[in-house]
Image (tube, rainbow, N blue to C red):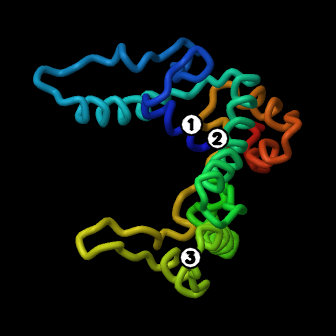
């Protein structure tokens, strides 16, 4: 769900069933954002992203289409694991995890061990014999993959968790559709603080 929200808000995904809306609920079309003379696509993207947040645009999600997309999304990991196994990879139990579990530590310091466990499970399913203390240290303190590379981790509890209604125009309807899903993994995507009330 978080991935879909980011894709829509950053104009990588815009359809009738998932798009940004202005405060009045009207479609805020990504392609309608004006170009500046001699502006690169990257500069326009960055400027549009800042303006969308400044304007308080939200995301409209068709509830039933979103529930279907989430079911397909959680099933995709299973399909990918089967595909890898069909190619001859010995491990037939590749872990399928959500971004929400992997990055839980960023929003809540008390969820650090949940994220450590998720990363351990993911790496273990790929045959990586990671040390739990090393994973915890990287998540807690951060590390660079190379001397000039970007730092990853080190931001435990630093991102404020906002309710779904902060981002989604019709959050209550979307939440209801996800909670009514026949797939427990889709229902689990709704966090207890996601309601607008």
Per the model, the C-alpha gap separating discs 2 and 1 is 6 Å
**Residue at the spot x=77%, y=34% of the render?**
175
List x then y, in percent, for residue 53: 44, 34
Secondary structure, mark 2, is: loop
Q: Is residue 174 left or right of residue 41?
A: right
Q: Is residue 33 above or below residue 185?
A: above
The answer to which quarter of the image holds residue 5 is top right
**Residue at the spot x=66%, y=35% of the render?**
165
Dot 2 and dot 1 residues touching (CB under 8 Å) = yes
The mark found on residue 5 in the picture is 1
Instruction: Judge depth for marks 2 and 3 and give the one in front.
Output: 3
Residue 110 in sight in this render = no
**Residue at the spot x=37%, y=34% of the render?**
49
Pointer 2: residues within 10 angstroms few (<14), some, or many (20+)? some
List x then y, in percent, for residue 87: 59, 53
10, 146: nearer the viewer: 146
128, 39: nearer the viewer: 128
Q: Is residue 158 above or below residue 11?
A: below
Pointer 3: residues within 10 angstroms few (<14), some, or many (20+)? few
Q: Residue furthest left?
A: 38
The mark found on residue 1 in the picture is 2
Dot 1 and dot 3 residues touching (CB under 8 Å) = no
Secondary structure, mark 3, is: loop
- Sequence-first disc among 2 and 3: 2
Quadrant position of the C terminus in the picture: top right
The answer to which quarter of the image holds residue 65 is top right
The mark found on residue 128 in the picture is 3
- Sequence-first disc among 1 and 3: 1
């Amino acid at each position: 769900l978080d991935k879909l929200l980011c894709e829509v808000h950053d104009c990588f995904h815009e359809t009738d069933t998932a798009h940004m809306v202005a405060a009045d609920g009207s479609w805020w079309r990504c392609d309608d954002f004006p170009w500046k003379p001699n502006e690169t696509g990257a500069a326009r993207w960055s400027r549009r992203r800042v303006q969308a947040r400044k304007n308080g645009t939200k995301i409209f999600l068709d509830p039933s289409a979103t529930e279907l997309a989430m079911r397909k999304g959680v099933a995709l990991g299973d399909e990918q694991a089967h595909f890898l196994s069909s190619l001859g990879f010995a491990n037939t139990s590749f872990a399928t995890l959500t971004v929400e579990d992997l990055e839980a530590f960023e929003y809540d310091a008390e969820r650090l061990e949940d994220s450590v466990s998720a990363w351990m499970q993911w790496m273990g399913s790929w045959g990586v014999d990671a040390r739990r203390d090393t994973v915890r240290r990287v998540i807690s303190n951060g590390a660079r993959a190379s001397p000039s590379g970007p730092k990853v981790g080190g931001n435990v509890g630093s991102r404020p968790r906002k309710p779904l209604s902060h981002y989604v125009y019709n959050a209550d309807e979307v939440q209801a559709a996800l909670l009514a899903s026949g797939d427990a993994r889709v229902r689990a995507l709704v966090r207890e603080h996601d309601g607008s009330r």
